[in-house]
Structures are given as C-alpha cells and as structure tokens.
Image: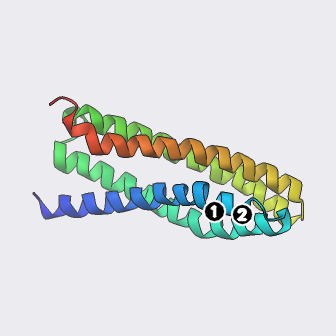
Amino acid sequence: MNPAMILLILIHILCAVIWVGGMVFAHFMLRPAALPLEPPVRLPLFRRTFERFFPTVWATVILLLATGFAMIVLGFGGFATAPQYVDVMMALGIVMMLVFGHLFFGPWRRMRGALDRGDFPGGAAALNQIRMIVTFNLYLGLIVVGVAATGRYWGA
C-alpha cells in the first residue's frame, strides 16, 4: 500500500476516534458526574470543557474532510469508483459536521452569552440543546464507525 494512503488512513482514524471519543466522554462520563453540581458550578465547568474540546473538533472536521477526499481520490480514483460504504461514510460525516456547525454557532453561542450575562437558566437551556445535539451526533458517529469497520465486507 502507498505510504501516503497509510498516513491518510492513520490521521483519518485518529481524528474520528478523538471526535467520537470526546462525545462519549462528555455524554456518558462528564455529564452524569456534573449533574449534582449547582448551575453556577456546573455550567462554567461545561463551558471550560467545551472551550477546550470544540477547537479540537474543528481541527478534526478539517482533517477528516481533507483525508477523506484524499483517500477517495488516491485509493479509489474518485467518487465514481468508490464503494457504496465510502459514500455512506462521507454523507454521514458531512451531516455530522453540519450538525456540529449548528451546535457551535447556535446553542454554544447562546450558552456563552447567557453565562457572560450571569443568566444561568438561559445557559442551562442552551446546554440542554447542546446535550441533545451531541447525543444525535454521537449516535451518527457510532454508525459511521460501524460502516467504516464493516463496509468493505458488505458485498462479499
């Protein structure tokens, strides 16, 4: 296999693991651990966490797109000859990226603004929207991982 393809696959997989793994951590570990905290403590905790995680997600989004397109061109000669599972991964990945963009520019912006004003109920409402969006994206991400792991065997 082409060394460039190996590097592209490695970067692509690591980015997917970081993004999906971060959502697993936030949803199943951080959220339940933070729920007993009062809003003036819980909401700034989530804000600091997201301020660190969201730039990482933006980096993974860029790298996932770049490596995904590069692998389609180098590995399959383009979309016309790529297997169906690659199209499914690309489509679901782009949906995930659009959903994240909505989260970032909508509820995340509202949460930061509410916390800047000391509006904890508004911040909590925005955080709940973020939770629902992350849950949706997490399950999409798990489906993409399943497609990536099994797709090459669909037609076999």
- As helix, strand or loop, the secondary structure at mark 1 comes to helix
Residue 54: which numbered mark, if any?
none
Q: Residue placed farthest to the top in the image?
A: 155
- As helix, strand or loop, the secondary structure at mark 2 comes to helix
Question: Which residue is painted at 10% across and 57% down in the image?
Answer: 1
Q: Could you tell whether 35 is left or right of 84 in the image? A: right
The quarter of the picture where residue 52 lies is bottom right
Question: Which residue is painted at 24% across and 51% down in the image?
Answer: 71
> Which amino acid is tagged 2?
Ala
Crowd around label 2: few <14 · some 14–19 · many ≥20 (10 Å): some
Q: Could you tell whether 107 is left or right of 14 in the image? A: right
Q: Quadrant of the C terminus?
A: top left
Give the CA separation, mark 2 to mark 1. 6 Å
Q: Could you tell whether 117 is left or right of 47 in the image? A: right
Q: Could you tell whether 36 is left or right of 6 in the image? A: right
Type of colouring: rainbow
Whether tag 2 and tag 1 are in contact, CB under 8 A, the answer is: yes
Kindly identify which residue carries mark 2: 34
Q: Nearer the viewer, residue 88 or 33?
A: 33
> Which amino acid is tagged 1?
Leu
Crowd around label 1: few <14 · some 14–19 · many ≥20 (10 Å): some
Kindly identify which residue carries mark 1: 30
Q: Residue placed farthest to the left in the image?
A: 1
Residue 75 position, x and y percent, is 17, 48
